[in-house]
Image: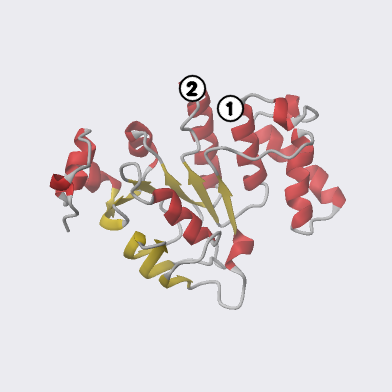
């Protein structure tokens, strides 16, 4: 992967908190992510993984702490980001028009939009579906279209929230191949997944969170072979992390 010299990274979170009512869902998270390595966020259901992505992407505001894109300087970090959700939202128009609309929002000229749209549909294997209404495409095709719509913007960072959770193995493989291409082209990948096999295949580094707290941040090889945190070790074994005996350990 070639890192953009004008990168908005590093991304630094300092004592990040998020509260809903009287419940703290993100608990004083602090870490730094650099451009380059693919970052996979792991943790049990309810750990706060999806919430963390939304905070980093600026979709919601934290209750406390700070999120800083140190390389952004006077630029708006949101202009260099994209996100794909577990359930993609398709516009009531063709696959081609869905991609074109994303480019139009960025102020890309009509001629350039046509070229870029054709290019990204070809890269994602969706050329034959260009004129098809997006909402009648299969779920796997829609998820690839959501990925194409994000990739065409050439983001510096792509947030992926359980993007293959509802896909069959064949569709998952195709999706992972596209992710690898996007990363190779220079985009930082930050992704949540419940699929441990997928995490092992894709991760360069792992963030493990539980009950809204960061318990481990380490290179993927170290995390999967010798996790430092007991709950991380239990999670890798496939144990259910719940109940009074699974309190956070640091």
Q: Do the residues labelled 2 and 1 touch (CB within 8 Å)?
A: yes
- The residue singled out by tag 1 in the image is 140
- Check the image and report above or below for 211 versus 180: below
Q: Which of 49 and 222 is in front in this view?
A: 49
Place of residue 48 in the rendered image (x, y in percent of width and height, measured from the top left): 38, 51
User: What residue is rendered at 52% in x and 39% in y?
Assistant: 86
Task: Say left or right for 22 vs 114.
Answer: left
Please say whether residue 11 is visible from this viewpoint: yes
Q: Nearer the viewer, residue 141 or 3?
A: 141
Would you identify the image quadrant in which residue 216 lies?
Answer: bottom left
- Mark 1 secondary-structure assignment: helix
Task: Say left or right for 249 vs 125.
Answer: left
Place of residue 74 in the rendered image (x, y in percent of width and height, measured from the top left): 60, 78
Place of residue 150 in the rendered image (x, y in percent of width and height, measured from the top left): 63, 47
- Mark 2 secondary-structure assignment: loop
User: What residue is rendered at 63% in x and 28% in y?
Assistant: 141
Q: Which of 112 and 47 is in front in this view?
A: 47
- The residue singled out by tag 2 in the image is 168
């Amino acid at each position: 992967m070639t890192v953009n010299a004008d990168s908005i990274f590093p991304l630094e979170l300092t004592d990040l908190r998020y509260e809903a009512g009287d419940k703290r869902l993100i608990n004083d998270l602090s870490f730094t992510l650099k451009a380059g390595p693919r970052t996979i966020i792991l943790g049990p259901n309810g750990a706060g993984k999806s919430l963390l992505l939304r905070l980093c992407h600026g979709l919601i505001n934290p209750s406390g702490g700070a999120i800083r894109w140190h390389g952004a300087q006077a630029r708006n970090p949101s202009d260099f980001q994209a996100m794909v959700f577990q359930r993609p939202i398709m516009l009531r128009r063709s696959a081609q028009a869905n991609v074109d609309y994303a480019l139009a929002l960025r102020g890309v000229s009509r001629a350039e939009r046509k070229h870029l749209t054709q290019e990204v549909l070809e890269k994602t294997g969706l050329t034959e579906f260009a004129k098809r209404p997006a909402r009648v495409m299969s779920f796997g095709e829609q998820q690839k279209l959501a990925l194409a719509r994000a990739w065409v913007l050439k983001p510096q960072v792509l947030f992926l929230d359980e993007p293959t959770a509802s896909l069959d193995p064949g569709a998952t493989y195709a999706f992972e191949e596209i992710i690898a291409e996007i990363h190779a082209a220079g985009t930082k990948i930050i992704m949540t997944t419940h699929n441990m096999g997928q995490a092992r295949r894709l991760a360069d580094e792992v963030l493990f969170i539980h009950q809204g707290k960061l318990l481990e941040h380490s290179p993927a090889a170290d995390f999967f072979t010798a996790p430092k945190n007991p709950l991380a070790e239990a999670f890798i074994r496939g144990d259910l992390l719940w109940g009074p005996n699974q309190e956070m350990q640091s």
